[in-house]
Image (cartoon, helix red, strand yellow):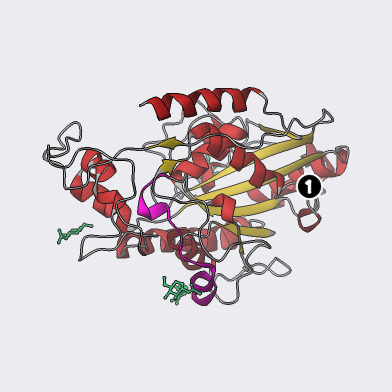
Amino acid sequence: MKVLALTQALLGLAASVQATTVDYTTVTGYFLQDETSTDASTFDYTAVNFGLINRTYPADRHLRNPHSLTQWERFYHQVQKWNEESPKDVEYKVLFLGRHGEGWHNAAETYYGTPAWNCYWAELNGNGTATWFDAALTSAGVSQALVAHDFWQKEINEQRIHTPDNYFVSPLVRTLQTANYTFTGLELPKGSAEFKPLIKELFREGISIHTCDHRHNRTYIHDLFPEWPIEKGFSEEDELWNGVTAETSAAQDVRSEKVLDEVFFTSESIKENSFASVTSHSGEISSILRVIGHRTFSLNTGAVIPVLVRAEKNTKERATVSSVAWTASAHCTAPPVTSVSACVCPSSAAPVTTPLVTDV
Ligand SMILES: *[C@@H]1O[C@H](CO)[C@@H](O)[C@H](O)[C@H]1NC(C)=O
Ligand SMILES: *[C@@H]1O[C@H](CO)[C@@H](O)[C@H](O)[C@H]1NC(C)=O
Ligand SMILES: *[C@@H]1O[C@H](CO)[C@@H](O)[C@H](O)[C@H]1NC(C)=O
Ligand SMILES: *[C@@H]1O[C@H](CO)[C@@H](O)[C@H](O)[C@H]1NC(C)=O
């Protein structure tokens, strides 16, 4: 417990010196998901045009015939207009944040119950019948990704939605598969960017000691989707997961901010490229929402949330944060005796903070 107290003290220190070069804010008033009256637990993005609110926009007056355009066409025009009119240190983007469909780790957490899952089963690679190390999608998860696929096609056909100019994806298998099932085979509008998602390390899930957060090596990922680019500097082995310490929310937010800095104000995403898709995870999407000042909005597996983000370069000197400490997580070394409300390890298998499995 001494170790734990120390890492928390370090964390407090690191968080207090943190500063940013870009300030991110959520521009509200355009999506239902931004409104406190919208209940995330019952919200269906496919039932309400991705949540885009029916309204007029200031930029409508520049349109010759706004009534012939759809809500998404007029919204896209408005976003373009903001980018045209804003100084060069300000950028607007719409991020379509998609959570992966159900993976084997989600099914196993339901099967074992969350306390037992967290304190023992999640630290294993699988149970002999199911594998959850870097979990793949279950068939239900594939169906959820196909719902997203069909919905995008409907939006393209009926709303003439501007499809993403850039696609990004977490390197974990469940997100790679979800992005693939969602976007492969869509009839994209003429002139739109092709679907070749950039695989980015820092869009991965919060890194716990669970093996579902341990990614495959680069070779494996490349062989799975040989056509997809992988960012420069992506290591062969997973250098972030260690099975002992878990990334804290504060550490995760620092990393989410870093990855957003790689997406905004970059040469590949000049202001005209204002729509981007990010296929990621529940924990990581929650972290991104915190960084952009969006209200909490939990997504079901396979769901997508669009967010309108305004980014502004901050001229203040950057105070560099070398690292934010992670915390050690304890777990049982044998199946827990009970898991109804909390995990209880068998007395012969007291909690430890050493990895349960080290092989892959
Ligand atoms: C916008 O209006 C259309 C009908 O004109 C309706 O079908 C749709 O549900 C409305 N969307 C929202 C988000 O209220
Ligand atoms: C392994 O976990 C899955 C749930 O994902 C369950 O259906 C299966 O029965 C488990 N297998 C064993 C051997 O316990
Ligand atoms: C990618 O998606 C396509 C279209 O749904 C599918 O046929 C293919 O099997 C998928 N590839 C992988 C590796 O999942
Ligand atoms: C990458 O991982 C796969 C399976 O997870 C393994 O078979 C392969 O040997 C590894 N390749 C390298 C270059 O380490």
Q: In the picture provided, is 6 more to the left or to the right than 52?
A: left
Identify the residue under disc 1: 265
Residue 210 % position (x, y):
36, 49
Q: Is residue 57 visible?
A: no
The answer to if 246 sits in the magenta stretch is no
Residue 240 % position (x, y):
51, 51
Residue 155 % position (x, y):
56, 57
Tell me the residue at 34%/50% (across/down).
355
In the rendered image, the quadrant that contains the N terminus is: top left
Is residue 93 or residue 74 the one in the foreground?
Answer: 93
Tell me the residue at 31%/63% (across/down).
138
Q: In the picture provided, is 103 more to the left or to the right than 175?
A: left
Q: Is residue 191 above or below residue 30?
A: below
The residue stretch that appears in magenta: 208-223
Q: Amino acid at mark 1?
A: Phe
Q: In the picture provided, is 286 more to the left or to the right than 156?
A: left
